[in-house]
Amino acid sequence: MSVSRSLAGIITAWLAVVGCIHGVILEVKEANSTCIKANLSALFSISYNTTNSTNTVQVSLPNSTTVDERRSSCGDNGGSPSLVMVFGPGHALGLSFSTNGSLYSVANLTLQYNLSDTSVFPNASGSGVVTVVSDSVGIQAAMNSTYRCMSHTTIALDNATATFYNMRLEAYMPGNDLSPKESVCTADSTSPTASPTTTTAAPAPTPPRQPEQGNYSLTNNGSVCLLALMGLQLNITYLPQSQDKAVQELLNLDPNVTHSSGSCGANRTTLVLTQESTIMLSFYFTLNSTAKMYHLSGITLQANLINMTAPFFASNMSLGYLRSTLGHSYMCKAEQTLAVDPTFSINTFDLKVQPFGVTEGQFAAAEECLMDQDQMLIPIIVGAILAGLVLITLIAYLIGKKRSHAGYQSI
Ligand SMILES: *[C@@H]1O[C@H](CO)[C@@H](O)[C@H](O)[C@H]1NC(C)=O
Ligand SMILES: *[C@@H]1O[C@H](CO)[C@@H](O)[C@H](O)[C@H]1NC(C)=O
Ligand SMILES: *[C@@H]1O[C@H](CO)[C@@H](O)[C@H](O)[C@H]1NC(C)=O
Ligand SMILES: *[C@@H]1O[C@H](CO)[C@@H](O)[C@H](O)[C@H]1NC(C)=O
Ligand SMILES: *[C@@H]1O[C@H](CO)[C@@H](O)[C@H](O)[C@H]1NC(C)=O
Ligand SMILES: *[C@@H]1O[C@H](CO)[C@@H](O)[C@H](O)[C@H]1NC(C)=O
Ligand SMILES: *[C@@H]1O[C@H](CO)[C@@H](O)[C@H](O)[C@H]1NC(C)=O
Ligand SMILES: *[C@@H]1O[C@H](CO)[C@@H](O)[C@H](O)[C@H]1NC(C)=O
Ligand SMILES: *[C@@H]1O[C@H](CO)[C@@H](O)[C@H](O)[C@H]1NC(C)=O
Ligand SMILES: *[C@@H]1O[C@H](CO)[C@@H](O)[C@H](O)[C@H]1NC(C)=O
Ligand SMILES: *[C@@H]1O[C@H](CO)[C@@H](O)[C@H](O)[C@H]1NC(C)=O
Ligand SMILES: *[C@@H]1O[C@H](CO)[C@@H](O)[C@H](O)[C@H]1NC(C)=O
């Protein structure tokens, strides 16, 4: 046990070192004084159209990322301070800051990606630079302190997500170095595994039991826009470090340590579930507003389990699950399997979701899956058969009684 412990320690330490090497350090200066400094790792998941389907790619912020000095600023001439990072041919990530005197926050995040870069976006049907913006980023810290978040934080954008980890950043800096005082993000302070030296997963247990039902929701402009109750079991097939044969792992999401984020749009709602820093599962719901129908159209998974040779990634953006009518929720108490690709599927238990048209934070009347309807049919059929038997017995008894009565009379 001590050997495996120390081995796990070495692997964790090694991964932490690699993580540090992979993080990039960027700063914005004006007149020799630094106003924004960031040390972070980021991973983007971007969906784009090809001629005949939709692809999703993973892009990580490379070490060669630099600051675009022309577009970055300390905000000394009236604008807001911003850090614009550029990488590859025409890709960029921008963070704009604002403050109210006691707190500073990321007012918005801008991601630009160049579909003409065929090495990243093979067979893209579009071309040129696409810009997507999110203004609900949730990065906030006290003035004169460094924002610290080692855990994965995911921000949903149109057709993309941005995930940050191993992040330390500060804006409106009083000196040229990150302030020693830290504002730690909630994910770090609630997750015991997310300390600076243990950014990678503890070995995941394989519980065969039914997963606990999680209760997830999203808000938009202060009101609830997505409700989801569900137990989720991930079925992942991957190549472990120690063997050259693929193994299959069943992993239950633990709602107690799963964080939900995402965004609600008019026709697209994205729910991102992050379990500690090891699992990031995204659900993309699409509304067809002419047909007034919605469905689960895409699922992506990023997982980084300790015994995986490389981070696991699976995605399918052309799914047709959980179909329901706008104004209703979708319910399936029975176990349902959502196949994503040959290496990944999800078993859902006790599921109830409503990704569109939520009013007053309540589920609307549910449309139930066929399996539940079938299960409801069983007691009805059994009941009908029993009622039939009782009726037949009764009729037989009455006929028998009448006959014997008649027989008695004829004597
Ligand atoms: C910035 O620092 C350099 C070297 O310390 C100095 O020569 C230069 O005058 C400074 N510039 C400003 C605008 O303070
Ligand atoms: C792909 O094409 C469809 C139909 O033209 C469009 O609705 C969708 O937004 C496109 N997706 C992306 C990622 O550009
Ligand atoms: C899309 O088209 C390409 C080339 O035309 C083809 O190789 C690929 O199999 C097609 N994919 C699907 C999902 O139809
Ligand atoms: C987008 O990528 C293409 C191909 O690499 C390149 O020619 C073009 O200059 C890039 N666009 C921008 C704005 O950098
Ligand atoms: C800044 O915003 C925070 C949170 O919204 C609030 O608690 C604080 O009082 C505000 N400070 C000032 C100086 O307005
Ligand atoms: C931040 O530090 C600067 C310089 O040390 C100081 O002038 C300022 O009042 C501090 N601000 C806050 C909100 O503590
Ligand atoms: C981002 O926020 C800054 C500061 O509030 C603002 O000046 C800028 O216009 C915003 N950009 C976008 C694209 O919303
Ligand atoms: C957000 O809420 C405010 C106040 O309730 C409202 O004025 C505004 O139009 C809303 N914005 C959106 C995009 O719904
Ligand atoms: C997990 O996936 C594999 C491969 O698709 C399948 O054979 C197996 O039955 C699945 N297990 C469960 C419990 O869903
Ligand atoms: C989650 O928390 C609840 C209440 O605190 C507890 O009853 C339950 O056992 C926990 N579940 C797991 C998987 O730890
Ligand atoms: C929406 O539904 C209508 C009617 O069922 C269908 O004709 C149309 O193609 C659908 N739109 C999309 C974007 O799937
Ligand atoms: C994605 O899902 C669709 C519908 O379930 C399926 O036909 C397709 O094969 C899946 N794609 C991959 C890459 O597995």
Image (tube, grey):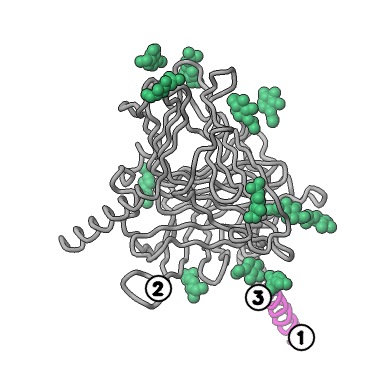
Rendered image: mark on residue 247: 2
Q: Residue at x 32, y 26 (%)?
A: 181
Which span of residues is magenta-colored? 387-411
Q: Nearer the viewer, residue 109 or 222?
A: 109
Apparent side of residue 407 relative to residue 180 in the rendered image (left or right): right
Q: Amino acid at mark 1?
A: Ser
Badge 1 density bin: few <14, some 14–19, many ≥20, Cα 10 Å: few
**How many angstroms separate mark 3 from mark 2 (CA)?**
57 Å
Residue beneath disc 3? 393
**How many angstroms separate mark 2 from mark 1 (CA)?**
81 Å
Apparent side of residue 188 relative to residue 348 in the rendered image (left or right): left
Badge 2 density bin: few <14, some 14–19, many ≥20, Cα 10 Å: few
The spot of residue 30 in percent (x, y) is 48, 24
Q: Residue at x 63, y 60 (%)?
A: 118
Q: Residue at x 33, y 75 (%)?
A: 243
Q: Determine whether the residue tagged by mark 1 lies in a helix, strand or loop.
A: helix
**How many angstroms separate mark 1 from mark 3 (CA)?**
25 Å
Is residue 294 shown to the viewer in this render?
no
